[in-house]
Image: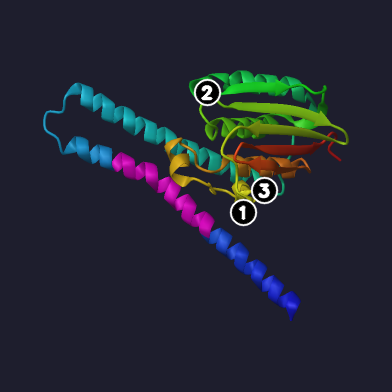
Amino acid sequence: SQPVQKSLSKLKAVDQSRQEFVSNVSHELKTPITSIRVLADSLMGMEEVPVELYKEFMADISDEIDRETKIINDLLTLVKSDKATTKLNISQVSINNLLEQILKRLRPIAKKQNIELVLENIREVTADVDETKLSLALSNLVENAIKYNRPSGSVTVSIHSAESAVLEVTDTGIGISPENQEKIFDPFYRVDKSRSRAMGGAGLGLALVSEIARQHNGQVKVTQSSEKGSTIALILPIAIP
């Protein structure tokens, strides 16, 4: 019957998604270890290694360890966030002030790529949220918009509210194709894998944003995208029921 077929298709899709997730996790965790192994073997295979080269290789090994640690920490954060029993530490938070702090923290990163960060305080918005988790979600959205932008581009963050707080992050990147607009919120999914790895991304940032939005009874979605750039909106209730 049709309902049975639908259920089987859904189960198949879930199973495939789980297999992809495990495969991606394995790959991401192995990549830095493989690099460390190659670097260490190279050092051990050399005789009378110059101090400068030794330091350079050790710095590279240290970078790979940092990368592995970040992947593990992001993964643990995602797993913890996914628990149904996760409690939110709710308080009244000025979203405007929170965004100002986040943009101030991320400006040095944006400056390296000559990306302009703009905050449009369309109106003052206060909402009942978990400040730590929302800060993590917004930081990930803005950092993502900086990373995948064009050189000398811009990232504009705007705040709107009515029944919900709507936080929009607009970049001047290459855009996200329609078939990727929902997938980008899946753990470890990346549109451009080679570019993401080169930038040190593990593909967990947007999955965390999606999970934090869900915990707040909100949602995150791509609201517009073209070759001129994209807008991702984080929509949260003003008050948590």
Q: Do the residues labelled 1 and 3 touch (CB within 8 Å)?
A: no
Q: Is 116 in the magenta?
A: no
Mark 3 sits on what residue? 83
Mark 1 sits on what residue? 179
Q: Residues within 10 Å of mark 1 (few under 14, many from 20)?
A: few
Lower position in the chain sequence, tag 1 or tag 3: 3
Disc 3 from disc 2: Cα separation: 32 Å
For this view, does 40 lie left or right of residue 80?
left
Quarter of the image with the N terminus is bottom right
Q: What residue type is labelled 2?
A: Ile
Per the rendered image, the range of residues in magenta is 20-37
Mark 2 sits on what residue? 109
Viewer-side label of 3, 2? 2
Q: Do the residues labelled 3 and 2 touch (CB within 8 Å)?
A: no
Disc 1 from disc 2: Cα separation: 29 Å
Q: What residue type is labelled 1?
A: Glu
Disc 1 from disc 3: Cα separation: 28 Å
